[in-house]
Image: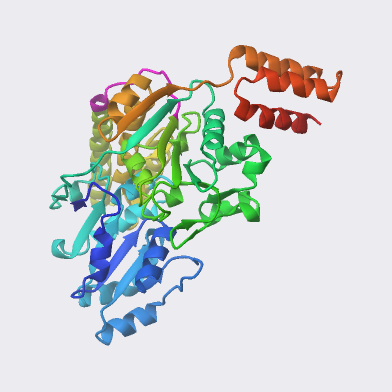
Amino acid sequence: MIDKRYPGIGATTLEIEDPYRNSIIVFPTKALAATKAKAKNIHYFGSAYPGVNVSTISKIIEDTESGLLTKIAIVADSLVNVYDKLRDTLHSYDFFIVLDEIDSFQTESSYRPKLEECIDIYLEFPPERRCLVSATLEQFSDRRLLSEPKTTIMIDDYVQLVVKVINATKSALKVAAQEIIRAYEPGKKVFVAFNSIDGILKLLEILPDTLAQETGVLCSTDSQSRFKSHQISRLENGILQHQITFLTSAFFVGVDVLEPQETVHAIILVDTNIPVSLVSEAKIRQIFGRIRHTAATYTIILNCTERPYLPISTYRESLNKRQIAYEQVLDAIHGSFDQVGLHEEGREIETIMLDTCRVDNICLLRRANNKVILSTSNFDYLIIRYTALKKLYSDFKNTVKNLNNNFKVHQEARHSELNQSEEIAIAKVEALLQDQELANMMHILENSITDPLLAKGKANRILTEIF
C-alpha cells in the first residue's frame, strides 16, 4: 500500500502511464474514474458520464489478446460484475490492480456494500500485482491487509495551508450563508463542500436570490433530481461552471479543480445535526486538495456537540471485543454446525445476526460467498467517525488543537450570528406581519439583523415565505 500523504502528486497517473504492464485501477467515484479515463484515453467501466464512452468486455479481451497494453479505469460498484467476466483475462495477462483512495472504501461501505467486495477481489491478486493508494490512509480492521507492505511518501518542503476555522455556535447554515456572501466577489469563485442534499437545499433558500441563481451543485446522478436543471453543475477541464459551487461526497476525492491560483474561496461546512456531513481530518485534507492551485482562502465552518466522549482507545477496544465475539460465533456456525448437518439452524442464526449485530444502525456483518462474515470496513467506518467526533466536533479547543497538526489555524472565530434579541425581533415581526404595513415590517427586520450582508436577503426571505 502507498500512503502518499499529499493529494494530487500523481500516484495513479504513474500506473496509468506505466508502459510495461496491463492495469486495472478501481476508483471510488464515477467522476474520478471517468475523468481519468477521458484524460488518458483508456478504457472506462461505470455508468454513463458526459463525454466518456463506456467500454465493453469484448473490447478489453480483444485488445489484451492482441498484445496491446491495456489500461482500465473502473468505478468500484461496477468491479464485481466486470470481474466475473474478465477474471481469466486479468489473471492470464498479469494485470496489476490498484484500489485508489482506499479510505473511501472504508468510510462509504455502510451504504455501498460492493466497496468491501472490491477488497475481496483485490486479495485474489498476488502481492506483487496489487496496491492500495491513499493520501489519507486509515487503519484497517481487516487482518488480511495488516501484512501488506507499506510505503510512505514525505515531502520535505511541504507548506501547510492557512485555514480559518469558524465555530458556529447556533446555526452552521446561517454562518455558511454569511461566509458565502462575504466571499462572493467579481473574478473569484466560491467552492463549498457540504455532504448533505437537504442542507444544500436549505442553504439555497437562505441565500439571497441573486446569489442562489448563480449557484450550481456537483453531486451524484441519483441526487440530481432534487435540484432544478440549471442548478446541476459540472467540471469542464477542471473549471467550475458556476460562480458558487456546492459539492457533495461524490466529488470529495480525486477530482481536480484547475482554476487559476488564488481565484477560489474554498469552504468546508460540517453540521453535527446532520451526521452524514461529518468529515475527518484526513477528508478535510482531501477536499482542500481538490483545489490544485492555491485557493484565495480556506475556511472550515463547523459546530461542536459539547458532549463528552469516551477515549478513542476505549471505543476501539469495545469494537475489537465485538469483532472477536462475532468471529467465534460465525466460526462455530461455519464449522461445528455444518459438520453435524445443522445447516438450516446455522443459516437462521446468521440471519438473526445480520439483523441484530449493529452499532448506531451500522451492520457489522455482511454476506459473501453464501455465508455471513465480518464487515471489517464498517468497523473501520465507525472508528473513523468516532475519532472525528471526538477530535473535531466535541469541543472547539480540541478542534483547533487537532487541526493544527495539518494546518495553520489562522483564525479561531465564533460566529457573530443572530443573537437572542435579533431572533426575538424576527419572531415578533413574523407574528405582526398580517396586522401592520409591509414597509414598516421591512424596516423592523432590516434594523433587527445587525449583519448588513444578511439583513436585506433575510428580510425578503421571511416576507416571501409568509405571503
Of all residues, the one furthest to the bottom in this rendering is: 66
Of all residues, the one furthest to the top in this rendering is: 421
Magenta span contains residue 366: no
Q: Looking at this view, is 88 or 242 the one in front? A: 242
On screen, residue 169 above or below 242: above
Q: Looking at this view, is 38 or 92 the one in front? A: 38
Question: Start and end of the magenta stretch?
Answer: 302-314
Would residue 201 appear left or right of 71 to someone viewing this image?
A: right
Where is residue 10? Give x, y as percent: 26, 59
Would residue 446 appear left or right of 78 to someone viewing this image?
A: right
On screen, residue 408 above or below 336: above
Would residue 428 appear left or right of 122 to someone viewing this image?
A: right
Q: Residue at x 30, y 21 (%)?
A: 310
- Main SS of residues in magenta: loop
Q: Residue at x 34, y 79 (%)?
A: 60
Where is residue 455? Give x, y as percent: 66, 26
On screen, residue 399 above or below 353: above
Q: Split into 4 quadrants, where in the image is the C terminus?
A: top right
